[in-house]
Image (cartoon, rainbow, N blue to C red):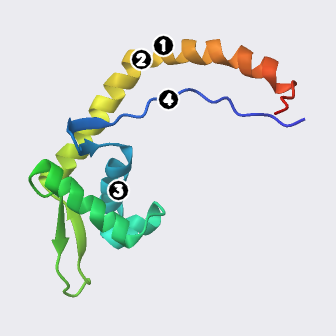
Amino acid sequence: MHKHATFLPSLSLRIDLAMDARIGPGKIELLEAIEACGSISAAGRAIDMSYKRAWDLVDEINHICGRKAVDRKIGGKSGGGSVLTPFGVSLVSRYRKIERIAARAVRQDLLQLQSDIEPVKKSRAGKRTSF
């Protein structure tokens, strides 16, 4: 008999700052990976994102915010790399704080939603639908 892990509902947060200016989980994950890996290319590889996509998102983040969230370290003995600016560190921290507060605020509603949906899913699991 196969045991299924219990899945708890979660909340994904996207902050719309303007019409086409959004900060969400993908951009924040990239910033965190840059901080952990020390370069945009290594961060992209770590989160299975192309180098070009990672660079495009960094440019987009900097443009949205009107200031740099990521700084490049030029060449040298260690070969350069990238680091989060103090603003970039603050952006990640503030986003994660907002995310935690929002998740706590809706936790009971998410659990209730899951409770409302699961009996329906289980009752349909044995039925076949033909088209």
**Front one among 35 and 69:** 69
Q: Position of residue 95 (x, y in %)?
A: 27, 38
Q: Secondary structure at mark 3?
A: helix
Q: CA distance from mark 1 to mark 4?
A: 11 Å
Q: Secondary structure at mark 4?
A: loop
Q: CA distance from mark 2 to mark 1?
A: 5 Å
Disc tally is: 4
Placement of the N terminus among the 4 image quadrants: top right
Q: Are marks 3 and 1 in contact (CB under 8 Å)?
A: no
Give the residue type that dot 2 points to: Val
In the rendering, which numbered label is found on residue 109? Answer: 1
Give the residue type that dot 4 points to: Ser
In the rendering, which numbered label is found on residue 106? Answer: 2
Q: Please name the residue that numbered disc 3 is placed on.
A: 30
Q: Residue furthest bottom?
A: 77
**Front one among 95 and 127:** 127
Q: Please name the residue that numbered disc 4 is placed on.
A: 10
Q: Secondary structure at mark 2?
A: helix
**Which quadrant of the view contains residue 62?**
bottom left
